[in-house]
Amino acid sequence: MRILAETENPRIVCRFLLKMAIELLATTEPSLVFSEAFDEARVFALTGEKQNEWWYMFDENITVAKKLMIPVDTHMQSPNESLTLELIELDKSRFVFHMKLFYLDMFCPLDYEIYHPPKKSLVEPEHRLYII
């Protein structure tokens, strides 16, 4: 049996992912972090105020999830295997934040004009799209 954890406040999760993305941007691309391209992401992440629609997506690898349920101690994995943070650059100054945590991939754009995949193409519960 599988019990899915579902957030009661997707808005807070989106803001959290944006905050992580901005911190990662500050670390990897310090010259870009305060550019106008990220103003709306910064404002929404820090204050919760938004002018446009934001989204984030969870993509669950069920095969890996099932393998992790069998071992006695999943914490024995190295940190490199259990957590990955990256910014995927689509084009100049347009990034999507990607966080991989064990079997769960999380995506959140740093630009509200980056459109999400069509909902029809995403099969739940493995793929969950939240539009804020």
Image (spheres, rainbow, N blue to C red):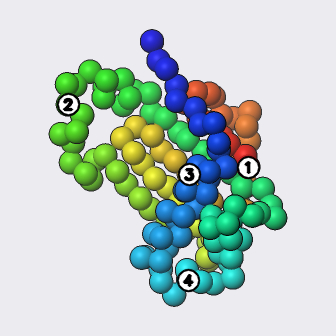
Query: Residue 70 in the image: x percent, y percent?
Result: 26, 21
Callout 1 amino acid? Ile
- Circle 2 — which element? loop
Question: What residue would you read off at disc 4?
Answer: 32
Residue sitting nearer the eye, 2 or 50: 50
Residue 102 placement, left or right of 51: left
Q: Give me the residue at 69% from left, 82% from top.
A: 36
Sooner in the amino-acid sequence: mark 1 or mark 2? 2
Characterize the local packing of mark 4: few (<14), some (14-19) or many (20 or more) Cα atoms within 10 angstroms. Answer: some
Q: Give me the residue at 73% from left, 46% from top.
A: 131
Query: Residue 103 in the image: x percent, y percent?
Result: 40, 37
Q: Nearer the viewer, mark 2 or mark 3?
A: 2
Sooner in the amino-acid sequence: mark 1 or mark 3? 3
List the single residue furthest toward the bottom: 31
Q: Nearer the viewer, mark 1 or mark 4?
A: 1
| 4 and 2 marks in contact (CB < 8 Å) | no
Sooner in the amino-acid sequence: mark 1 or mark 4? 4
Alpha-carbon distance for marks 2 and 3? 27 Å
Callout 3 amino acid? Phe
Residue 7 placement, left or right of 74: right
Question: What residue would you read off at disc 3?
Answer: 107
